[in-house]
Amino acid sequence: MEEKQAIQALAALAHESRLHVFRLLVRLGQAGAPAGRIAGELGVPAATMSFHLKELSRAGLISDRRTGRSIVYSLNIERMRALLAFLLEDCCAGNPELCRLPLVESIRLDPGNTKTRKRRIGR
């Protein structure tokens, strides 16, 4: 993940309602939920929820798909994984086993995560 993409994703999550939406969609997994259900569960007005969903979608953190007459939103797992990998890339000087963070190791050892990122900060 590029630094600019990480900043956009973090900015999208830097709002209480959007963070709640993201966490709800993490719990729901690939099944996701329609906007009305998300708004209802979080107690957010539908118009406001549409704005927050758009922001999370623009950051690539969630995806949408049409199911009948509804649009179902779900977590973009690959984008979440890329953001976590970006944030934890330099953990313990590149030795995640020293941090004892299984999440870091699973992100790095994921066979789907084969791209290596050139260091972009300060260069």
Image: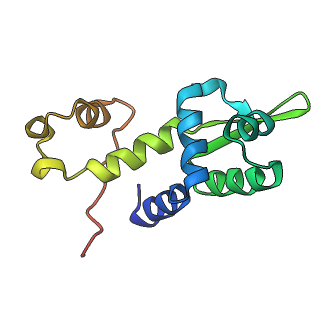
How far across and down, in percent of the image, does residue 104 sit? 25, 37
How far across and down, in percent of the image, does residue 115 sit? 35, 45
Q: Is residue 38 left or right of residue 67?
A: left
Which residue, as the protein is rendered here, is positioned at the far top? 31
Q: Nearer the viewer, residue 15 or 111?
A: 15
Which residue, as the protein is rendered here, is positioned at the far right? 69
Where, by quadrant of the figure, is residue 123 drawn?
Answer: bottom left
Q: Is residue 50 left or right of residue 84?
A: right
Q: What residue is shown at x 52% (from left), y 55% (from top)?
A: 13
Q: Is residue 8 left or right of residue 100?
A: right
Which residue, as the protein is rendered here, is positioned at the far left? 98
How far across and down, in percent of the image, does residue 68 sit? 89, 27
Q: Is residue 43 left or right of residue 11?
A: right
Q: What residue is shown at x 65% (from left), y 58% (from top)?
A: 55
Q: What residue is shown at x 50% (from left), y 60% (from top)?
A: 14
The colour mode here is: rainbow
Which residue, as the protein is rendered here, is positioned at the far bottom? 123
Could you tell me which quadrant the N terminus lies in?
A: bottom left
Q: What residue is shown at x 61% (from left), y 43% (from top)?
A: 21
Q: Nearer the viewer, residue 117 or 61?
A: 61
Q: Is residue 120 above or below residue 89?
A: below
How far across and down, in percent of the image, does residue 105 sit? 23, 33
Marker count (numbered): 0
